[in-house]
Image (tube, grey):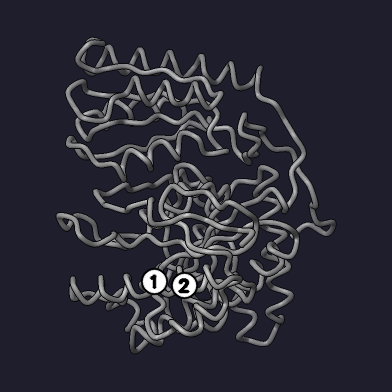
Amino acid sequence: MMSDPIRSWQGFLRRDGSKGIRNKVLVIYTVECASFVAKAIGADFPEDDVDVVGFQGCTDNEYAVRMLLALIRHPNVGAVLAVGLGCEYIQADRLARKAGEAGKPGAWLLIQESGGTPGSVARGREIVRDFLKRLAAESVRVTMGLADLIIGAECGGSDFTSGLAGNVVVGKCFDLLVDSGGTAIFEEIVEAVGLREQLTARGRTDWARREIGATYDKALEYCKSVRQFSVSPGNFAGGLSTIEEKSMGALAKSGSRPIEGVLKASQRPECKGLWLLDSTPDPYWMGFGYTNPNDNEGLTVLASCGAQLLFLVTGRGTVVGNAVAPVLKITGNQRTYRRMEDDLDFCAGPALSGEKTLAELAAELLEAVMEACAGRPTKAERLRHKEYYIPYKYQNLETSTKRCNS
């Protein structure tokens, strides 16, 4: 860690007033048939901040469209190239137009009209090179601090140390962030089983408490309907015995501050503070969409809510990153950290060995956050782990209206 902690850094100002900690060219494919070309375009820029995301489906899905639009508007994104095949529902030209409306350079191409694979890859690389030059010359730099940050957190590969150290340190770091005027988002409502009263009691307002309760009830009914709770053989091998036990540890990453309300995928917080993310599909639809298919989906949903940086807490170890937001991976297991130090950014294990207090580790984690925001690559970024996942899903945003001042 640095002896003189960073308190501010230079970010990238966007038209909507948000500030990014990266300045990415985002290559988006609109259907799986276009993914090869999009990835080939991105692969030509290994030393630049050029990343690829996309949606596999050919048919229409409002959830996926909202996710892609949210990632286009993300503060870490400076320019967008949309790559389509030509016959799918999601239209590349409309995505590029939305980028322009957000004040970002946008372009599009259709593989069917651009010479197939070779011609499309060549054209796409030409567009990306032009975008990189424009971003270098035209991007507006601005001072950022903790009050400008949104950080999202989720768990992956949890073991007994996650609820005793890893998640607890993240929760205390979230308290520091919120107290500094920043915003924190925690997810995995399906890992709050048995904790309805604890969650609802933390709602800042009556409205927030009602919304949290309804979100919990929906998630519990969903898990029952698919006969699957968010607990795995790896969790059992790591010392967790039940979903309730795992849930107590998972909730620790939210810290102790009041919860402002509930966000659904692609919604940004209306005010600063702590927010709960609901990624569970809404009922009364045709049944597409598991709530937690993998950690890549959870990280992508957190990014869609505007999080410039992500926490991923893992006891047993994970290697993934994210295509839009840098990921800081935290473990409470010192053995896991020694075994996977090339992939993991921070070890909260000294809290269990008595070498450091939880408060000391939370302060160190916050310092690591600021270093990453100032440009220091995370382990996932160094290894070019830039995963993402957007599934078919359904969520009705009309049922989620924020009232921060009520």
Q: Element under label 1?
A: helix
Mark pair 2, 1: CA separation:
6 Å
Q: Badge 2: few (under 14), some or many (20 or more) residues near its Cα, within 10 Å?
A: some
State the residue at coordinates (65%, 39%): 19
Tag on residue 125?
none
> In the displayed structure, would residue 16 be above or below residue 128?
below
User: What type is the residue that disc 2 sits on?
Assistant: Arg
Quarter occupied by the N terminus: bottom right
**Which residue in the structure is indicated by mark 2?**
210
State the residue at coordinates (61%, 33%): 16
Tag on residue 214?
1
Q: Is residue 13 left or right of residue 157?
A: right
State the residue at coordinates (47%, 57%): 263
| Residue 236 image point, x, y percent | 32, 83
State the residue at coordinates (60%, 58%): 404
| Residue 340 image point, x, y percent | 48, 64
User: What type is the residue that disc 1 sits on?
Assistant: Ala
Q: Element under label 2?
A: helix
Q: Which residue is situated farthest in the left direction here? A: 286
Q: For this rendering, which residue is in front, 56 or 165? A: 56
> In the displayed structure, would residue 362 be above or below residue 3?
below
Quarter occupied by the C terminus: bottom right
Q: Which residue is situated farthest in the right direction here? A: 4
